[in-house]
């Protein structure tokens, strides 16, 4: 049960100023918090002191975790894969609109600042994947890496968890797709390209805007837009089927760029495309609205009015069938624009069909390892 406190300490629901290099400075309370804090001015400048303390940008903390399982099944008809792997929880890219932010609530961490500064790294992911693939009842399915948080976020440079997973996938000839906003994927072309040539791998690069200033504000630690286009070129040049995700589409923000993003990605070598409209579940709603008021106050009300229009009067619609596309006139117009642009540019529709027949279970462990 939540309890109210009038302590003059940090005020959780009065958002602090923006932090350089972070999507949000707000350590917003999550929906499972047992205590909430309310601002109180005691006459000694406590509110100002709290704001100054909050303004100090925290360093990223990597929390290493050994997990029991690494494969997650998908029961949503909106998503074109059966299984997913997310090597990290939380994401340092700090995308202000990220629908995954509320997952940090399950860890008793803030979906705001904690989500992008306290990153959980699943250090035994490759080992658990090997165990999963060795199970007698395992049947290969369409597998995606990075569907929730980016598998190539900055921590991957040192930890190389994603690369170790791809090594297992290459060894077992298990098909997979991967989606990212990072150019670090280029490091692993040596593994991905041979699998792609065998019909076992595809990549998708997310590009939300071509405006570097908007990208820096909205996705502060992701690769710059021009760098993502170069990544598409590099993947395509290596023979890897590559698509572009123009997601999320945000009315009056990146929505006017929709056709230009698709054209730039097509010119870079993307052959497939998909797009989803903005959705703001749980705490993301307050976080994103705060960002709008700070960064684009002249458009904040218009953006939210259109979001509500596409979400049946709410900030989020979690129902299958509409959560990715929205509903209403505006959502229909966006779909028409996207479809016409894809047709004009020669994009293929649907995801790449990967070959499930080549899978071979990993070699059995030898020695004492067989006991576990």
Image (cartoon, rainbow, N blue to C red):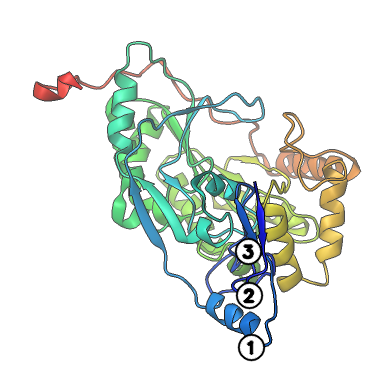
Quadrant position of residue 365: top left
For disc 2, the neighbor class at 10 Å (few under 14, some 14 to 19, many from 20) is some
Tag 3 secondary structure: helix
Furthest residue toward right: 329
Quadrant position of residue 170: top left
Against 4, residue 272 (above or below) is above
Tag 1 secondary structure: loop
| Image marks 1 and 2: residues in contact by CB distance under 8 Å | yes
- Mark 3 to mark 2: distance in Å? 31 Å
Residue at (71% x, 38% y) in the render: 324
Furthest residue toward bottom: 44
Against 46, residue 331 (above or below) is above
Residue at (81% x, 45% y) in the render: 334
Quadrant position of residue 168: top left
**Residue 8 circle label:** 2
Residue at (66% x, 25% y) in the render: 77
Tag 2 secondary structure: loop
Camera-side residue: 244 or 326?
326
**First-in-chain label (3 vs 2):** 2
Residue at (40% x, 33% y) in the render: 196
- Does the rendering let one see residue 283? yes
Dot 1 corresponds to which residue? 44
Residue 189, given in percent of the width and then of the height, sits at 35, 45
Residue 359, given in percent of the width and then of the height, sits at 35, 19
- Does the rendering let one see residue 269? no
Dot 3 corresponds to which residue? 218
For disc 3, the neighbor class at 10 Å (few under 14, some 14 to 19, many from 20) is many
Residue 208, given in percent of the width and then of the height, sits at 64, 55
């Amino acid at each position: 049960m939540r309890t109210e406190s009038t302590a003059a300490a940090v005020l959780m629901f009065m958002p602090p100023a923006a932090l350089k290099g972070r999507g949000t400075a707000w350590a917003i309370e999550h929906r499972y918090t047992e205590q909430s804090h309310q601002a109180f001015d005691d006459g000694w400048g406590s509110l100002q002191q709290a704001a100054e303390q909050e303004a100090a940008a925290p360093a990223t903390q990597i929390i290493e975790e050994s997990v029991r399982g690494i494969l997650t099944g998908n029961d949503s008809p909106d998503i074109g894969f059966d299984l997913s792997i997310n090597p990290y929880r939380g994401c340092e890219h700090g995308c202000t609109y990220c629908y995954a932010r509320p997952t940090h609530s399950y860890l008793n961490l803030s979906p705001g600042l904690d989500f992008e500064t306290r990153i959980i790294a699943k250090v035994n992911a490759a080992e658990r994947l090997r165990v999963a693939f060795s199970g007698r009842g395992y049947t290969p399915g369409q597998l995606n890496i990075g569907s929730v948080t980016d598998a190539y976020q900055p921590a991957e440079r040192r930890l190389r968890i994603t690369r170790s997973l791809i090594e297992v996938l290459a060894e077992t000839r298990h098909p997979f797709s991967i989606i990212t906003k990072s150019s670090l994927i280029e490091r692993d072309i040596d593994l991905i390209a041979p699998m792609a040539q065998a019909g076992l791998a595809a990549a998708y690069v997310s590009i939300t805007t071509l405006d570097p200033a908007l990208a820096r504000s909205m996705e502060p630690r992701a690769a710059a837009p021009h760098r993502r286009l170069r990544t598409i070129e590099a993947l395509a040049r290596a023979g890897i089927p590559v698509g572009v995700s123009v997601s999320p589409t945000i009315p009056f923000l990146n929505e006017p760029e929709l056709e230009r993003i698709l054209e730039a990605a097509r010119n870079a070598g993307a052959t497939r495309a998909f797009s989803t409209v903005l959705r703001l579940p749980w705490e993301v709603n307050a976080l994103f609205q705060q960002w709008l008021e700070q960064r684009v106050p002249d458009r904040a009300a218009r953006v939210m009015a259109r979001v509500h229009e596409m979400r049946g009067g709410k900030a989020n619609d979690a129902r299958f069938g509409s959560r990715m596309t929205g509903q209403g006139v505006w959502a229909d117009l966006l779909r028409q624009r996207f479809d016409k642009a894809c047709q004009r540019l020669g994009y293929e529709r649907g995801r790449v069909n990967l070959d499930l027949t080549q899978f071979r279970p990993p070699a059995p462990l030898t020695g004492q390892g067989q006991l576990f």
